[in-house]
Amino acid sequence: MTDSVLLRVCATYCHPEADQDAYDSLRRLAVRPGDREMALFKAELRRALTDPDQVPPSLYTAVRYDDGSAERFLRRLWGDLYPDELVPNPPGR
């Protein structure tokens, strides 16, 4: 996941220097039909949520989230971007 769409998109739109307009742009992009990059992003986000141990530490470096963990940040991100869909969970949860 080191060269992933998930990391690239998060670094662009969720970085502390990105403003609210950037995050709002991500919300619009996330639901844009037919966007291949965003479909890959959603698939990688889903995978990261179902196996949070695989999320590289570079996510924190890229985003500087203050949620306490990558999993919490990713769960919040999913909820913001896809509010009408259940947040994917790791197996057994």
Image: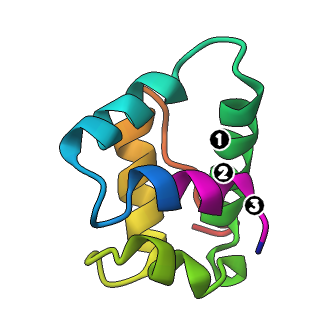
Residue at 48% x, 83% y is: 61
Q: Position of residue 58 (x, y in %)?
A: 59, 83
Q: Quadrant of residue 72?
A: bottom left
- The residues colored magenta run 3-10
Q: Which of the pair 31/47 is nearer the observer? A: 31
Residue at 72% x, 34% y is: 37
Q: Amino acid at mark 3?
A: Ser
Q: Is residue 16 visible?
A: yes
Q: Position of residue 25 (x, y in %)?
A: 37, 30
- To which residue does mark 1 refer? 42
Q: Farthest front residue?
A: 17
Q: Amino acid at mark 1?
A: Lys
First-in-chain label (2 vs 3)? 3
Instruction: Verify whether residue 63 appears in magenta.
Output: no
First-in-chain label (1 vs 3)? 3
Number of on-image labels: 3
Instruction: Verify whether residue 7 appears in magenta.
Output: yes
Q: Secondary structure at mark 1?
A: helix
Magenta segment's dominant SS is: helix
Q: Is residue 1 visible?
A: no
Task: State whether residue 54 is above or below residue 89.
Answer: below
Q: Amino acid at mark 2?
A: Arg
* Of labels 2 and 1, the one closer to you: 1
Q: Is residue 21 left or right of residue 30?
A: left
Picture disc at residue 4: 3
* Of labels 2 and 3, the one closer to you: 3
- To which residue does mark 2 refer? 46
* Viewport quadrant of the N terminus: bottom right
